[in-house]
Amino acid sequence: MAAPQFEVPKLSDTAYTDVPKVQEGSMGHIKAFVAGQGPQEFLGYPWQLGDDWKERALDRMGQVLKKYRSVRVFLDACVHCGACTDKCHYFLGTADPNNMPVARQELMRKVYRRYFTLPGKIAPWLVGAEDLTKETLDQWFNYYHQCSECRRCSVYCPYGIDTAEITMAGREILNYVGYGQKYSNEILGKVQKIGNNLGLPGPALEDTLAGLEEDIEMDTGVAVKMPLDVQGAEILFVTPSADFFSEPHVESLIGYAKVFHAAGASWTMSSHASEAGNFGLFNGNYETMRKVAMRIRDAALQLGVKRIIVGECGHAWRVAYAFWNTLTGIGYGGDDPFSVELQKQLDPRYKQPTHICEYTWDLIQKGVLKFDKSKNDHRVVTFHDSCNVARGSRMGDEPGGQFTIPRNVIKSVVNNFHDMAPETIGESTFCCGGGGGVLTDDLMEVRVKGALPRMNAYNAVAQERGVNFLALICAICKAQFTKVVPYYGFDMSQVGGVHQLVSTAILLEQD
Amino acid sequence: MSALTAFYIGLYYVAAIILIGGLAYRVYEYATTPAPLNIPTTPAPTTLMGVRFRMFREVVFFESLFKSNKWIWIFGYLFHVGLALVLLRHIRYFQDPVWFWVEFLQPFGKYASLAMVAGLAGLWARRFLVDRVRYISTPSDHLILALLIAIGLSGMAMTFVAHTDIIALKAFALGLVTFDWQPLPADAPLLVHLFLVALLMIIFPISKLLHVPGVFFSPTRNQVDNPRERRRLAPWAAALEKNNG
């Protein structure tokens, strides 16, 4: 860990993070790397501001207002009550007032008012309306990349205003004028050209999986398979590509494979659709998000699978659960030829798509899986609800299943489990600080400071309950925490996946 | 008919047209703008009945605000409930005979005005005292609070201090709705009160008061959490399927 160029916040004495006094401009110096020509042109955007950038920006804003009710209503409905002002982890960690959700929205709302509302056209000074200037555009780029689109503010807003929708609209407009973010846009190029966010080509993936199979067999003496591109398999398994080689992600991949093995499932991964993540969500561009998701539909049709299961990834699960049906027809209830084509192939006995935790929990309830919990006795575990799973999706049949099912899985495989403080989990969960396209080294200060509320809650259970393992179901959370917990004095080995715990405890029968 | 009466009659017709027409236009705008993706803030109800119940709790109890901040909730709730009772009390000016329950509500509505103004004062105080709220407050945020408080105080002045000619006022109000125009009593508190109320009606459809229709159209609150069972497709999104399959 290189010495930080900024002051790392101090942990508090309790699980809670004190609300700081406003410090104007404290994060004004942040600027993510700007996307260059290649990724911008691939996505169909210009790569530098033209003379007409302002017209283009306002033009795009007008289109977004016509296409998205959310943006339209949210820009009108805010009363500046202040309920959201102390809810964002980035504000709590940085004290920059532009990281208060309402102020983040206001960066766009002031432009909306000026050009799209009567009072803003007549008396801009009265209603906080302002011209769109290059300074404002720079502020957008800065502060719309200090938002992880975690939706915590939307829980607390009396009108349900979701700042994520505003951030997405802001990024879409920025892209449209040629002011994109390098990290997200390069990834969106790789996933569409190669099939995953890491740019891992098919043969490399095949090698990696073969290597992992050998490792598992050496370790357990059981020939657990990691099938790729198996025509006619029953299950298509789609997981974030970080699972293929990052630590601790790969431990969960081994866990999934063991679960499928123990269940005797016919499953496969796909080299064409070797990525569950979908950064199209972060950019707020429906067309891009749809194109990325279509690879999974194509793979499902081509391989002839009956079910689709998704690995541990927060935003991927939101896109899969909430959007795949609309974007690609993976789901039920469609009556158009496009969706019927796929739906008649899928097995109606199962939820489409299914989360790996739903799948594992179902097998546990049926008594299919056997565990030796004591193998996890060196661990005292807590669970971090990933923001996109917690507030943008569900598992199982009941509202809140996204909270109970992963915990049920954990409690089935470990003896020592303690939840963090109630105001920091469930629907109130704090983002890891690296979601929504922020997981890049050029935003390290934002990431470290944004992790503060979660680190305070984790520190409290670590001190009081001896917790030493932060269980996750998100590839971004895993990568973020692995990098960030050392800044707060924790070892990165305390970070891992839920299926890593499953992998440790599961008992496999020798063939 | 005096010029004063004529002015107020004209003002109220204009204000009513702007309020009703403006709100109708906004509602039309919100209703016809597609919501292309399923984005309820979860955990969310999985049935339409559940969503109605969620919206009911949101609108009647300010559930999310209660979770969020008890002070804003207390002041906001005092104001809104006070205002609701005061408005119901005002129905008596527009009907003859007066409905039983409107009659029954009179004393409650009278004292609700105190709650209303107290709530507004609390909300206004926060705009000065809490640094985060001070940072986000615009001139119009202060002016709307000033406007509402002035409406409340001028009304209370007539209830608690110097009564106006209520018989004549009722005749004026009934005359407005029946187009049988009657003279307006020229009392200062009444003229101020009526003028400010008309102003409030006029700015309603172009100000943050749009939170009133807005909350019902908020996709994070009014959508059913059933995306695996139901496919939703906005018209502009369906066009993408035709273009490139």
Image (spheres, coloured by chain):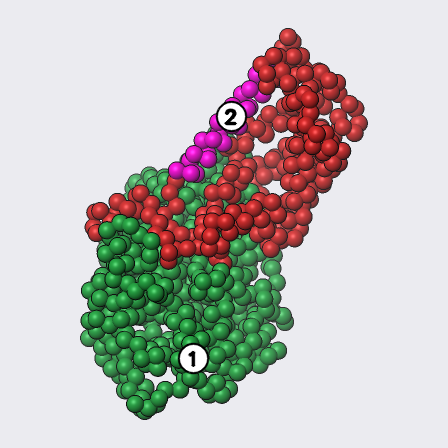
In-front residue for pair B180/A175:
B180
Q: What is the CA distance from the residue labelled 1 to the residue labelled 2?
A: 66 Å
Q: Residue furthest top?
A: B1
Examine the image and state in which quarter residue A12 appears.
bottom right
Q: Colour of chain A?
A: green
Q: Please tell me whether mark 1 or mark 2 is closer to you in this view.
A: 1
Question: Which residues are the magenta region?
Answer: B6-32
Which quarter of the rendering shows the N terminus of chain A? bottom left
Image position, residue B190 (x, y; %) = 70, 22
Q: Name the chain letter of the residue that bears numbered label 2.
A: B
- The residue indicated by pointer 1 is A367
Q: Assign a secondary structure to mark 1.
A: loop
Tell me the number on the disc at residue A23: none
Which is the main secondary structure of the residues drawn in magenta?
helix
- The residue indicated by pointer 2 is B18
Q: Residue furthest right?
A: B161
Amino acid found under the numbered disc labelled 2: Ile
* Residue A245 sits above or below residue B197 on the image: below
Which quarter of the rendering shows the C terminus of chain A? bottom left
Residue B87 seen from this side: yes
Chain painted red? B
| Residue name at image x 30 percent, y 64 percent | A347
Image position, residue A321 (x, y; %) = 38, 60
Report if the CB atoms under discs 1 and 2 are less than 8 Å apart: no
* Residue A105 sits above or below residue A252 on the image: above
Q: Is residue B45 left or right of residue B82?
A: left
| Residue name at image x 65 percent, y 27 percent | B91
Q: Name the chain letter of the residue that bears numbered label 1.
A: A
